[in-house]
Image: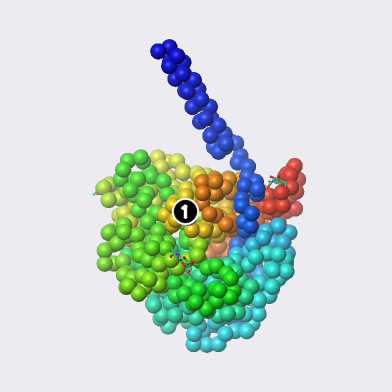
Amino acid sequence: MKTSWTLKKYYFIICILLILQHVYSNKIINGLEEEVKKSEFPNGFLFGTSTSAYQVEGAYIEDGRSLSNWDTYCHINGVIPNGGSGDIADDHYHRYLEDIDLMASLGVNAYRFSISWSRILPRGKLGHVNPAGIKFYNNIIDSLLLKGIIPFVTIHHYDYPQEFEDRFQAWLSPLMQEEFVHFAEICFKSFGNRVKYWATLNEPNLYMEMAYLKGVFPPSHCSPPFGKCSYGNSDIEPLLVVHNSILAHAKAVKIYRDQFQEKQGGTIGMVASAYMYKPMTDNEADNKATNRALAFRVAWLLDPLVYGDYPIEMRHYLGTKLPIFNGEEKILIKNSTDFIGLNHYTTYFAKDCLNSNCTCMESDVLCTHGENRAIRGYVLITGQKDGAYIGDQMGMPGLYVVPQGMEDIVDYVNKRYNNLPIFVTENGYASNENQEGYDMDQDRKRIKYHKAYLASLARSIRNGADVRGYFVWSLMDNFEWRFGYTVKFGLYHVDPFSLNRSPKLSAHWFRDFLTNTTLNNIQAKSTI
Ligand SMILES: *[C@@H]1O[C@H](CO)[C@@H](O)[C@H](O)[C@H]1NC(C)=O
Ligand SMILES: *[C@@H]1O[C@H](CO)[C@@H](O)[C@H](O)[C@H]1NC(C)=O
Ligand SMILES: *[C@@H]1O[C@H](CO)[C@@H](O)[C@H](O)[C@H]1NC(C)=O
């Protein structure tokens, strides 16, 4: 009896030690900054920076480019803070060589960028291919390769010729599928001999929300209770937009696989917006609500691409509102992605609205007033619980620092999609500064954010996820959609008048992380 009691005490002490060791090894003790090493990532891992065409290029009416949906939208007075637009943006169109030099100096081995549809096909299928557009992206690709930087190309990232909107309502129409396939095919033909990583579409599962549910991106469609727009139906249109996006993706992938993949030797996938969710309480209803949140946001897009149909939860709650893939389409979309691209920034609480009253707080930026509707999965999503935030607030309303979310979302995607290769195509820290500003304290938080999220990503890799790349959003401060130039994600500061780029502390940190040099006094290195 006595020995067994001693044994129990012994086991008890071992347990405590193991827990402590776990806590320390995960560095989840308050105040202890997470450290992460490049060597924790596999060989050949892509480390890069990310941008998109409309956010950085400028030159909006040069060399045959037609007006895009975003040009039209930004030129409507008052929609973007301080009258902001992508007319000039970072003038990357003229400064791409300098920008590629910046990337080379960071030591990245990859760059994710997107192609301006209206530069390549000013009138879509109705018009010609614009040689100046092809030349511009040829120059970028060739210059990257010269510096040993791998191009990772998003074909479509939010911007398309305005004409599509005027003629057939763009993503609301199946005609957009054919337009996209045409565009993608021209990209494969023109650039595929050098581009080995293709992402078809960027975040249709976020675009639908901004553009067709809340109406805060072009074409500003929405309906009550989600918002007051002159046109739209928030309960239906987001479903059609994602449906057309999935079919457009799958048709482009089929062409790539049938006609290009073998000789060009590349890989093709889709990029999803992928927030993580935690149950508001540990009751069963909130746990189920968390699963619904993931199904209605992430699996909505990814289940069709892997399994050939929408998640059953969506069919259950949306019924006939959710479009149907016919037999042929199911075959087309199933297994239509070589990899999964995840844009991950933050984590939210999920609260059940099936069994409880979900009136959200007016002051909560995430509140849509339609929490208790099928399109939202009967889930309230918020960053607050009992007056406290889920993590430190970033400079963009509704973003919080929750590093553990990275491991959790990658684990979720890894398990649900049988270990498909994953690229983290965006991850970044938003600071809120005036246009000229550089706030070093916020940038220090950016460094801390990237370290902690990378450490979390490294854990998911140790858990067995096949993660192959990580792209910082963004290379430089740029046009942040409806926030204009008031929210900044860049590793480089861009002066709004001279457009000169200068490295922030976070750029030095990333370079040191990538080039494996020892940091002695990072503070001393600021050049701003
Ligand atoms: C740096 O390189 C050395 C030797 O190549 C390696 O042992 C170490 O783990 C690396 N450190 C980081 C931070 O990657
Ligand atoms: C999915 O498609 C790829 C490319 O066509 C093929 O190599 C792979 O075997 C397919 N996987 C499954 C599970 O069908
Ligand atoms: C839900 O809460 C709102 C505001 O507190 C209240 O007006 C409404 O009657 C409640 N509904 C139910 C079903 O309890």
**What SS does tag 1 mark?**
helix
Q: Position of residue 300 (x, y in %)?
A: 39, 61
Place of residue 320 in the rendered image (x, y in percent of width and height, measured from the top left): 26, 67
Horizontal side of residue 413 vs 522, given as left or right: left
Q: Circle 1: is it few (<14), some (14-19), or many (20+) Cα within 10 Å?
A: many
Residue 475 image-quadrant placement: bottom right
How many marks on residues? 1
Is residue 334 visible in the rendered image? The answer is yes
| Residue 279, x across and y down, in percent | 38, 45
Quarter holding the N terminus is top left
Residue at 44% x, 72% y is 250
Query: Which residue of the protein is positioned furthest toward the top in this rendering?
Result: 2
Colour mode? rainbow
When asked about the image quadrant of residue 221, the answer is bottom left
Q: Residue at x 29, y 67 (%)?
A: 321
Mark 1 beta carbon near ligand 2 (under 8 Å): no
Disc 1 marks a residue whose amino acid type is: Asn
Residue at 35 percent across and 40 percent down: it is 282
Q: Does 395 sit above or below residue 198?
A: above
Provide residue 519's location: percent of width, then percent of height. 73, 44
Q: What residue sits 60% from the left and 69% below the top?
A: 196
Q: Is residue 372 above or below residue 29?
A: below
Residue that carries the numbered disc 1 in the rendered image: 414
Residue closest to the far bottom: 127
| Residue 436 appears in the picture as rendered | no
